[in-house]
Structure formats: C-alpha cells, structure tokens
Amino acid sequence: MGLNMKIFFRLITISFIGISACSNTVQSSTEKEISLAAVDSIPSRNQQIIDTIIKYVPIISPTYKRAVCTELVIPIVEKFYTLSKADKNRIRIITDKNIQELLKQDSPIPKGVYYALTEKGIGEPVENLQNVLPGDLVQFWTDTWGHCGVVKSIDTENMTMELYSSFPSTDGYGIQKFRIPKHCFFVRMK
C-alpha cells in the first residue's frame, strides 16, 4: 500500500476513533493500535481491488438487471488478469446440475470465483475466516440461493460480512450485509 493510502486510511481510522469517542464509545489504546495495524495488513492487491471497485463498479453495475453479482466480479478481476471463456463460466457457475448436490459432493463447480481463480493459479484460498481481509473475493450459498462479491468487512464473532456486490435489494452495485453461511468460499487474488 502506498504511503498516501496508508495516511488516508490512518486518518479515516483516527476520525472514526474520534467519532466513536464523541458517541460515548470508549476505545482502549490497544483497540486503536489494532485498528491501525489492520489497515497496514491489507495486501496491496486487495487495496487495488477495493480502489477499482470504488472507481468502476457504479458504471459496471448501475442496476441489477444490467449486472448480477457474477457480472460485477468478472470485470473487476479482468482489470488485473485476462479471463478465458472457461474462467468466466466458472465464475458464473454454468452447470445443469443441482447446486446443493454439488455442494454435498464438495464439487469445485459451486465455488464460482474461488474455483476460477484457484484453478487459473491467480488466487489463493482463504480457508480460515480469521484470515479473511477486505478485498478478498467470495462465493457463498444458502439452502436456496447463492451470491458472490468482494469483502468490505467481516465480523467472525457475529458471523456476518459486508460485501461490495450487485444484489436485488440494492438494485445493482451496493454494500450489503450477509450472514456467513456454511458454504462460503473465500479467495485472495494474487
């Protein structure tokens, strides 16, 4: 992460700490150090992904009809790597098989962006929730539907995550909070 970005994020963190103090929220010096350390621990590629989302995604996905979740993720990845038709189909999870059955069989197909990036050698699996960082990509499935996006934040204690994604309730690009389900596949782009 460049020096200017580190300073920017530290100022945001310090501003947030100040706002928290004004709202009668007490934050210890240890918590402040953790907040500042967390900013420094985001890999530069992850920060580049977040910067790319902020710059391009409102244009890529102004409505859900124009770009569903996978059609938001594909152009973001393509800002860094060329994707083949097979790569894109893996992200889109093109299959005529039952997703829930594939999940039970631990098939790579429902893992979407995780499968595409790891298969191509441009992504590293993030298996432990404690290691998930902003800018990581994710594909997840509930019992009835699936979704993909880019992690904005994760709360492992409450098992929730905020994603940059395209979702029906945001009618395109937005930041949405989701519960972390059993079938959740995180990947970090190299």
Image (tube, grey):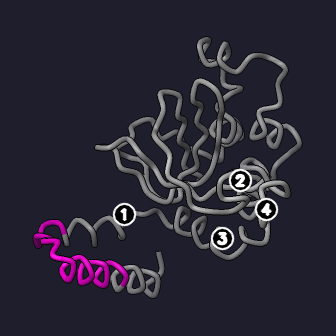
Relative depth, front residue between 65 and 13? 65
Magenta-drawn stretch contains 17: yes
Range shown magenta: 12-31
Instruction: Give the Cα distance between marks 1 and 2.
Output: 23 Å
Q: Which residue is drawn at 28% across and 72% down?
A: 36
Q: Is mark 4 on a helix, strand or loop?
A: loop
Total residue callouts: 4
Query: Amino acid under label 2?
Result: Val
Relative depth, front residue between 1 and 173? 173
Residue lying at the far right of the rendered structure: 85
Q: What element carries label 2?
A: helix
Foreground mark, 3 or 4?
4
Q: Which label is found at residue 52?
A: 3
Instruction: Give the Cα distance between marks 3 and 2.
Output: 11 Å
Query: Amino acid under label 4?
Result: Thr
Residue, disc 1: 41
Q: Where is residue 99 in the image (x, y as percent from the top left)?
A: 70, 21
Q: Which label is found at residue 153?
A: none
Name the quadrant containing residue 58. bottom right
Q: In this view, does 186 lie above or below 149?
A: above
Q: Which label is found at residue 63?
A: 4
Query: Amino acid under label 3?
Result: Thr
Q: Position of residue 183 (x, y in %)?
A: 53, 28
Q: What element carries label 1?
A: loop
Whether residues under marks 1 and 4 lie with C-beta atoms below 8 angstroms apart, the answer is no
Q: Which residue is drawn at 62% across and 12% down?
A: 105
**Callout 3: few (<14), some (14-19), or many (20+) C-alpha neighbours within 10 Å?**
some
Instruction: Give the Cα distance between marks 1 and 4.
Output: 33 Å
Whether residues under marks 1 and 2 lie with C-beta atoms below 8 angstroms apart, the answer is no
Foreground mark, 1 or 2?
2
Relative placement, left or right, of 77 versus 21 is right
